[in-house]
Amino acid sequence: MGIFLKIKKAIRNPKLILGYLREKKSYFNKMFMERMIVKNHKKSFPDFFFIQIGSNDGVTGDPISKYIKKYYWKGIFVEPVRYLFKKLKKNYDSHKNVFFENVAISNKTGLRNFYRIKKNNELNNPVWYDQLGSFNKEVVLKHKNLIPNFDKHFIQEKVKCVTFLNLLNKHKIKSVDFLHIDTEGYDFEIIKLIPFKILKPQMILFEYVHLSKKDQKKSLELLKKEKYKFLYLNQDIFAYL
C-alpha cells in the first residue's frame, strides 16, 4: 500500500491516528523514563537501591532487569510463586547485591488466597501466562479466553504474606530509589502501604491497566499529593519526583 493510500485510510479511520499517536507517546515516555533512571542511578551511585514486588522470573517481560544487571543494582526481589521464585534466584545467582523474598506483599501478615495459572506445557500458551497471579480473582479470570485449557490449569493456593513495612524493617531499608510493582490488579493496595512520611521512593513504576477506573484515579491522586509527576507507558505508569 502506497503512502497516500495509507494517509487516506487513516483519515477515514480516526482510531488509527489515535492509536498511532498513543504508541508514539508511549515510546517517547519510555525513552524519558530511561533517562530518568540513568540520571537517578548516577546521582545515588553506589548506593542505588530498588525493590521489585511481583518479580516473576526476573527476566521475562521485566522492564528493569537490564538496569539491574548493567549497573549491578542493590535491591530486593519479591515473588510468592515457588517455582518462579526458584527461576528468579537462578537468573540472578551471580548477582551478589540482591536479596530474595518468597512472599507476597499485603496489608497484613499471614496466609492469603492467591489465584494463578499453574505451570503447564500447553502449545499455544501466551508467553505471559505464568505472570497471571493475583489476589484479585477477576483479573485472572478475564484472561480465560486467551489461555488454553484455562479451567484445567487455574488454581487457588495459599501464599505467605508480609506487609511493606515488615519488608523494610527486616532488611533495615532507609531509602528506596526505584520501586517496581507488578501485581496484576493489586498495585494500588501496595502503593497505599508505602510509608511516604519516612520513606519516599524517587521513582515508582506500577501496572495501571488492571486497576479499576476508581483505583486508577485514586492512585494518581495519592501520588500527586506526594508531589510525583507521571508518564504513561502503555500498561504501566512511571511516577517520579
Image (cartoon, rainbow, N blue to C red):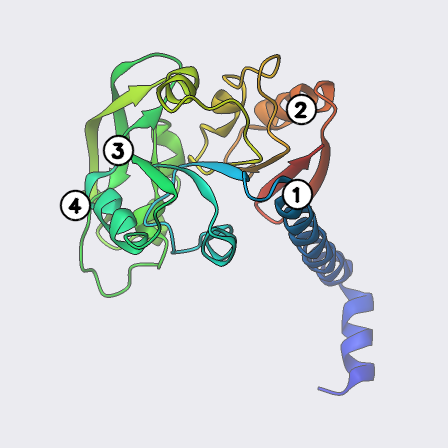
Count neighbours of disc 2 (C-alpha within 10 A) and say few if under 14, some if 14 to 19, many if 20 or more. some
Residue type at tag 4: Lys
- Whether 43 is drawn above or below 25: the answer is above
Q: Is residue 227 left or right of residue 66?
A: right
User: Judging from the image, what secondary structure is the residue with disc 3 in?
Assistant: loop
Q: Mark 2 or 1 closer to N-term?
A: 1
- Give the label on residue 122, or none: none
Q: Are marks 3 and 1 in contact (CB under 8 Å)?
A: no
Q: Distance between the residues labelled 1 and 4?
A: 45 Å
Number of the label disc, if any, that sits on residue 152: 4
**Residue 214 location in percent, x, y?**
60, 22
Q: Residue 102 carries which label?
A: 3
First in residue order: circle 4 vs circle 2 = 4
In front of the other: label 3 or label 2?
Answer: 3
**Pointer 4 or 3: first along the chain:** 3
Say few, some or many: other residues with alpha carbon within 10 Å of mark 1 (under 14 / 14 to 19 / 20 or more): some
Amino acid under disc 2: Leu
Left or right: 216 as drawn, with respect to 22: left
Q: Nearer the viewer, mark 4 or mark 2?
A: 2
Q: Are marks 2 and 1 in contact (CB under 8 Å)?
A: no
